Amino acid sequence: MGTLILDKRNLELKTEGMALIIYEAGERKSTLPIKSIERCIVMGSSIKMEAGVIQKIMEAGGSILMLSSRYHQRNAFILGNKHNDALIRIEQTSRLLDPQWCVDWSKMIVKEKLQHQRKSLNHLLKRRPDKRKALLLAIKRIEQQLTSLSCEDYQARSYADKNQHLASLRGVEGSATRQWFAAMAQVFPSQLNFRSRNRRPPRDPVNIVLSLYYTLLHFEAMRAAHMAGLDPLIGFYHQPSYGRESLASDLIEGLRPDVDMFVLRLFTEKVLRNDYFSYEKEGTCIMNKASRHTFYQAWEQQSPIYRRYLRSHCRKIVNVFKQEQQLSREFTTLGDDEEEEFES
């Protein structure tokens, strides 16, 4: 089974031995083996869950993500059993204090993200010749940002000035991402009113779907890091910050263009439609029951690709730590098979 999604009112969860019993409005509805639940996604606050349920899911290696009912923002999470090798976390912390590691890692992440953006835009250019001008402009400017990553002035900067390096990289990434979303706004169906990235709260169907996808992807990155023995809080591009799982943010950065393309496909193929969403008085976009049901089905079909990617990357990080190897281009570049899966 893998994923259990709880998105109904008046649900109550209990256990009988190693079985999970789900009740709806007091009536017994279904029984599941707890060992089959890798992750449990709980939507809203009306679902009752015994402490024993949480404990047994965790003991079986499962994780729990709790989301708010209105905007689907993360309220809480519980990760399952972790890897017990403390030396991995010690090495991770020591790399945080190494300016060269942080800069090389960060540059690799930004380069990967921009390369995926450029490749996706070239792919769109073949499909949408009617948007040629906007797509070519974005491709040109993203290529300029990629070139800036290799310029001599950039390479000549001292690794000791880590903060200046990271600020420069964030500027490169931010500029490319603005061009990316400006181009994407041209290819999403016009009735969705997608103009740019916005959140908290989202103002259109595209943004609310993107936000929920990113939230679930971030949770998967936390889970992959936790299981590999890494600390999700200690990142290198996203430096540690109170309340942020910075390593998880690092891990999903290169996946964002692929998620955006997948969401585009859901809307252009009308898997998700404009009438699946509603708006509150202040303009906040809300997913209705039909959109959530369709969304989670699509997520479960696509997410195994992302999970493999994240597990693979976490294993590579641990191997680099253990073998004291230097970073290489091979470390974060998707294999051909994985890229075909993203684009299919």
Image (cartoon, rainbow, N blue to C red):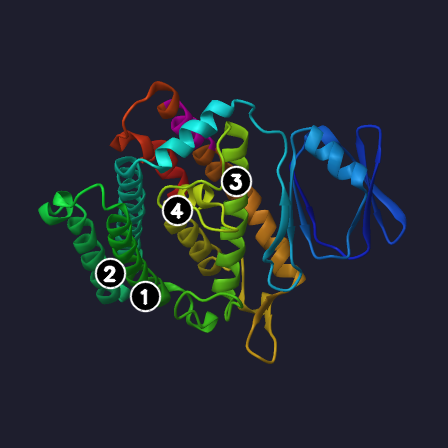
Q: Which residues are magenta?
A: 311-319
Q: Is 42 covered by the magenta stretch? A: no
- Amino acid type at circle 3 is Met
Looking at the rendered image, the disc whose residue lies closer to the viewer, 3 or 2, is 3
Q: Residues within 10 Å of mark 3 (few under 14, many from 20)?
A: many
Nearer the N terminus, badge 3 or badge 1? 1
Q: Is residue 47 left or right of residue 194?
A: right
Q: CA distance from mark 3 to mark 2?
A: 32 Å
Res. 64 visible in picture: yes
Q: Is residue 159 above or below residue 7?
A: above
- Amino acid type at circle 4 is Gln
Q: Secondary structure at mark 1?
A: helix
Q: Secondary structure at mark 4?
A: loop
Q: Indicate the position of residue 1 as horizontal and vertical percent values.
A: 66, 34
Q: CA distance from mark 3 to mark 1?
A: 30 Å
Give the residue drawn at x 30%, y 38%.
Answer: 105
Give the residue drawn at x 41%, y 27%.
Answer: 91
The residue to which callout 2 is attached is 138
Residues at circles 2 and 1 in contact by the CB criterion of under 8 Å: yes
Residue 222's disc number: 3
Magenta stretch, overall SS: helix
Q: Is 313 covered by the magenta stretch? A: yes
Q: Secondary structure at mark 2?
A: helix
The residue to which callout 1 is attached is 182
Q: Is residue 22 above or below residue 84?
A: below
The residue to which callout 4 is attached is 239
Residues at circles 3 and 1 in contact by the CB criterion of under 8 Å: no
Nearer the N terminus, badge 3 or badge 2? 2
